[in-house]
Amino acid sequence: MKIRGRLVFKGEKANEMIDIIALSLAPDNLSEIKTITDKNSATVTFTADKIGTVLSSVDDYLMNAKIASDMLKLKSR
């Protein structure tokens, strides 16, 4: 059985930030991680055989997204 998880990042007037963060993290996406962006959101899906693997992947992704977001905020100062 496959376990699936999904993160959705949304934000008004934040589409540029969402795109930059999603695109900067995309190279680290394994075949089980898919990212889809549109005007005001990015959706990331995670698939694995074990729930622990999905949870670890989500945790890693969120940590990296936070770092990318912090870097963008520093750049815009």
Image (cartoon, grey):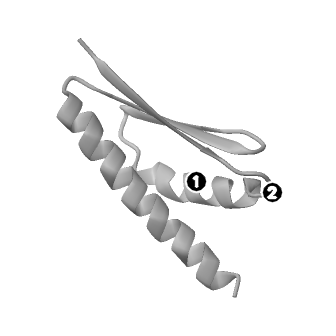
Using residue 6 as the reference point, say whether residue 30 is left or right of it.
left
Q: Mark 2 belongs to which amino acid? A: Lys
Using residue 58 as the reference point, say whether residue 22 is left or right of it.
right
Q: Which residue is mark 2?
A: 13
Indicate whether 67 appears above or below 65. Answer: below
Q: Mark 1 belongs to which amino acid? A: Leu
Q: Position of residue 66 (x, y in %)?
A: 47, 64
Outermost residue on the top side: it is 1
Question: Which quadrant of the figure contains the N terminus?
Answer: top left
> How busy is the neighbourhood of tag 1: few (under 14 within 10 Å), some, or many (20 plus)?
some
Q: Position of residue 21 (x, y in %)?
A: 57, 58
Q: Which residue is mark 1?
A: 23
Indicate whether 69 appears above or below 22. Answer: below
Using residue 18 as the reference point, say whether residue 4 is left or right of it.
left
- Report the label total: 2
Q: Secondary structure at mark 1?
A: helix
Task: Mark 2 or mark 1: name the one nearer the start of the chain.
Answer: 2
Residue depicted at 35% across the width and 44% down the height: 58
Q: Which mark is residue 3?
A: none
Residue depicted at 41% across the width and 54% down the height: 62
Residue depicted at 54% across the width and 77% down the height: 71
Separation of marks 2 and 1 at Cα, in angstroms:
17 Å
